[in-house]
Amino acid sequence: MGSSNHLFNRQRTVHEIFGGGFVADVILWRQKNVTVGILLVALASLVVFERWGYTLLSLVSSVLLLLLTILFLWAKSAAILNRPSPPLPELHLSEETVNEVAAFVRTRLNAFLSVSQDIALGKDTNSFFKVAGYLLLISILGGLADFLTLVYTSLLIILTIPALYERYEDFIDKYVKAMCKKSQQLYAKFDVECIGTTQKWVLEKQKLG
């Protein structure tokens, strides 16, 4: 493969990086109704759990009880009064959707297990420091916010940052590359002026010693 104009010289699109299927469509807002629905449900859950003091089990049980009661009474009254039954959609997951989600989870899980094995066997030092840094960051964030808030914030980031990056990809890539180039220039200057001078001073001290 030739060189790429994208950030980090990647060859794949953002959509392909996220699996290229239904999950990628949701993350990148190509299934807008689903994405907005997920955000609204997450926001409602945050309000319910944080403000009203519900737990997950009590909330799910209450919602299911209310829903089933309404549908049951509706269906019974409709049968007595010869009215239409509740307009329920077909509750069915297509095999294609299940396969896409399963393939996405399997790919990410296998990648995680592979990296974990390399780290455990001491084969990948860079990954060890990266994972250690991420875990430290999660630990710090976990101390600043509760689990539910952290999950909602992470979901919000997942459903906004990739979509914004895809939309303004060219501008962001150009800006980041310029910043990286500038950082490399500054490091080279620092290396020459500071590190080089320090090494020269150490060598002179060793000669004098």
Image (cartoon, helix red, strand yellow):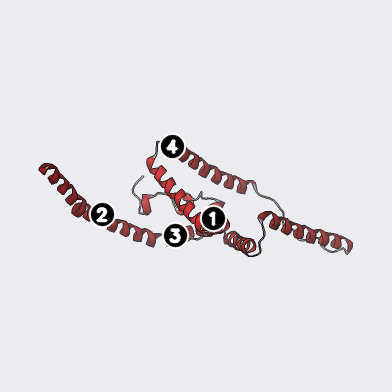
SS at circle 2: helix
Q: Quadrant of residue 127?
A: top left
- The amino acid type of the residue labelled 2 equals Tyr
CA distance for labels 3 and 1: 14 Å
Which residue sits at x=87%, y=60%?
A: 79
Answer yes or no: do the residues labelled 3 and 1 have beta carbons within 8 Å? no
Mark 4 or 1: in front is 4
Q: Residue 194 in the image: state x and y as whole percent.
A: 20, 53
Report the Cα–Cα distance between label 2 and label 4: 31 Å
Q: Quick one: which residue is furthest to the left in this view? A: 208
Query: Earlier along the polypeptide chain: callout 3 or callout 4?
Result: 4
At x 40%, y 45%, the residue is 129
Q: Nearer the viewer, mark 3 or mark 4?
A: 4
Disc number placed over residue 187 in the picture, else none = 2
Q: Which residue is mark 3?
A: 165
Q: Amino acid at mark 3?
A: Tyr
Report, in whole angstroms, how far the alpha carbon at label 1 lies from the one at label 2. 40 Å
Label 4 – label 1 distance at C-alpha: 31 Å
Give the SS element for disc 4: helix
Closest to the observer: 187 or 85? 187
> Which residue corresponds to mark 4?
118
Relative to residue 170, is residue 138 drawn left or right? Answer: right
Residue type, mark 1 in image: Asp
What residue is shown with label 1? Answer: 25
167 to 22, vertically: above or below: below
Residue 170 falls in which quadrant of the image? bottom left
* Mark positioned earlier in the residue sequence (2 or 4): 4
Which residue is most to the top?
121
- Measured along the vertical axis of the image, is residue 20 above or below residue 171? above
